[in-house]
Image (spheres, helix red, strand yellow):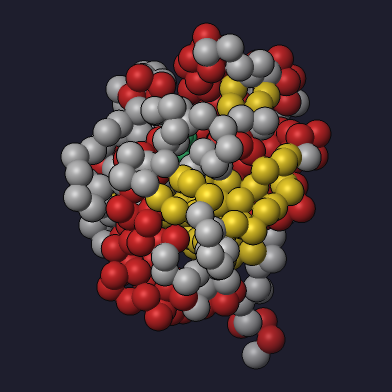
Amino acid sequence: MLGDVEAIPAMLTVIDTDPGIDDALALLLAWGSPGVRVDALTTVAGNVPLAAAVTNALRLMALRRPTPAPRISAGAEQPLVRPLWTAVKYHGADGLGDLPGWPPVDVDLVPRDAVPLLLDAARRYGPDLTLIALGPLTNVALALRADAAAMRRIARLVVMGGAVDVPGNVTGTAEFNIYVDPEAAREVLDAGLTVDVVPLDATRQATITRAELEQALGRTPGPLADRIAAFTERGFRVDLGRGSPGMVLHDPLAVGAAIDPTLVGWERVRLAVGDGGETRRASGDPNCRIARTVDLPRFRTMLLDRLCPADRGAS
Ligand code: BDR
Ligand code: CA
């Protein structure tokens, strides 16, 4: 019966994430984007330890109440072979700016099955699925180890990570997500998937000022707008302190480029991952595209129009 047929969204996605202030904005962008259905969230240790990443994913779901609610699962607690290096200096000890007053959530209800969930989505949706990875690539590498053929069926993997022709943000040459788990990044880039990498080369161009965010949130006042203003405060403070003109939107740009690939200018390259998390150009066939330029006015408009929709902001 026609009425029973599930409407196919313009983009079906699974988001692997380690929230994180910019991950939170990226999730809000995806949830506010018409035609985008976030089928599942898989969480990974990165910005914060795994329990905090799961807590934050649940907090954001409780706050925003996306419909349909994504499936959610906990993934890797540690990188493939090294100890976890977090980014709590940037994001706060809890990963979202250390604010009181989040909705209470129960991490114990979330299953520890990120790899089976990634594989289930890959097998179920195959070429209709875009996987977006906003943290270290540990879960994605483990899913590839478990069933590379299933993972290779997905349309596209969009990765926030790397610093190709620009300095890194953890070391002089390494970007955080790749630095935390370079072995995973290497396995993912070598796996033969269609990979789009959104590195610091592009994300450092993608900034918003406090005034721009405040003006946008002022259009839909309410608890969601208040909370976005509160948890981004720390991101603005740290980024402005580092000399950026505003908050740097790493993960939101990756989601934006996943939804609308024309927002960025791409270059096909072969990337090799060094042991220190370097992402270097290498000779040989390209293994990914990297984003190099950003249509900033279009990206800013997209983000600011979608972060806090009227029907959610005022509830
Ligand atoms: C990346 O590192 C994390 O701190 C951010 O969430 C983003 O995914 C930027 O280097
Ligand atoms: Ca992230």
Extreme front residue here? 283
Left or right, residue 62 beside residue 204: left
Q: Residue at x 33, y 67 (%)?
A: 143
Q: Is residue 95 above or below residue 1?
A: above
Q: Residue at x 23, y 57 (%)?
A: 112
Quadrant (top left, top right, bottom left, bottom right) of the N terminus: bottom right
Left or right, residue 31 beside residue 116: right
Q: Is residue 58 visible?
A: no
**Residue 251 x/y as whole percent:** 54, 40
**Residue 49 x/y as whole percent:** 25, 37
Find residue 158 and report its image quarter.
Answer: bottom right
Quadrant (top left, top right, bottom left, bottom right) of the C terminus: top right
**Residue 74 x/y as whole percent:** 29, 52
Extreme bottom residue here? 1
Q: Is residue 143 visible?
A: yes
Q: Is residue 187 above or below residue 273?
A: below
